[in-house]
Image (cartoon, rainbow, N blue to C red):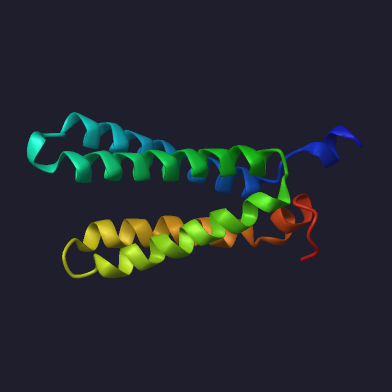
Amino acid sequence: MSERSRRIPVPLAIVASVVGAEGVVLVLLALAEIAALDGGRLAMGVTTALFFACYGAGLVLGAQSLLRRSSWARSPVVLAQLIQLGVAWSYRGAVPWLSAGLAVVAVVVLVGIFHPRSLAALGEQP
């Protein structure tokens, strides 16, 4: 394979970067949750932190796998973005700026992952 054909397409590189950043943010939220633990809500804090850590680690793994052109990574990444759109919708009245930010990020990832060059790089026909 030539060097040019082995390059990651720009849309897929953007998707991997954004998804990786989402994963890192979730891991940081897990650490913040652990730092805020108190005796009154210990079980809830630990399970929330564990959820955020696992979700974030999964997104980082998905981002790395997309950079390696593993087609299996597309499905969990798409699912995570659809969940994020649902979360954005639920925050639309309470925190509109957060809702808009979550929605924009999810749409950018979805558009990028279904871009014809991304699909071709992952071995899928556009």
Residue toward you, 52 or 14? 52
Counting labels gives: 0
Q: Is residue 20 visible to us here?
A: no
- 27 and 16: which one is in front? 27
Dividing the image into 4 quarters, which one contains the N terminus? top right
Q: Is residue 19 left or right of residue 120?
A: left
Q: Residue at x 65, y 44 (%)?
A: 66
Give coordinates of residue 118: x percent, y percent: 70, 54
Drawn side of residue 58 relative to residue 123, left or right? left
Quarter of the image for residue 69 reads top right
Q: Where is residue 14 in the image (x, y as percent from the top left)?
A: 57, 45
Quarter of the figure with residue 94? bottom left
Q: Residue at x 32, y 64 (%)?
A: 88
Question: Residue 91 at what x, y percent from top left?
Answer: 24, 65
Q: Nearer the viewer, residue 91 or 29?
A: 29
Q: In which quarter of the image is residue 37?
A: top left
Q: Which residue is drawn at 45% across and 59% down?
A: 106
In the figure, 48 relative to 85: above or below?
above
User: Which image quadrant: the C terminus?
Assistant: bottom right
Q: Reply above or below: 122 against 13.
A: below
Residue 82 located left or right of residue 29: right
Residue 93 visible in rendering: yes
User: On screen, 74 above or below 27?
Assistant: below
Residue 27 percent location from the top left of the image: 37, 36
Left or right: 23 as drawn, with respect to 125: left
User: Among all residues in the image, which is located at the extreme right?
Assistant: 1
Asked if 90 appears above or below 27 in the picture, the reply is below
Write the residue at 55% across / 54% down: 77
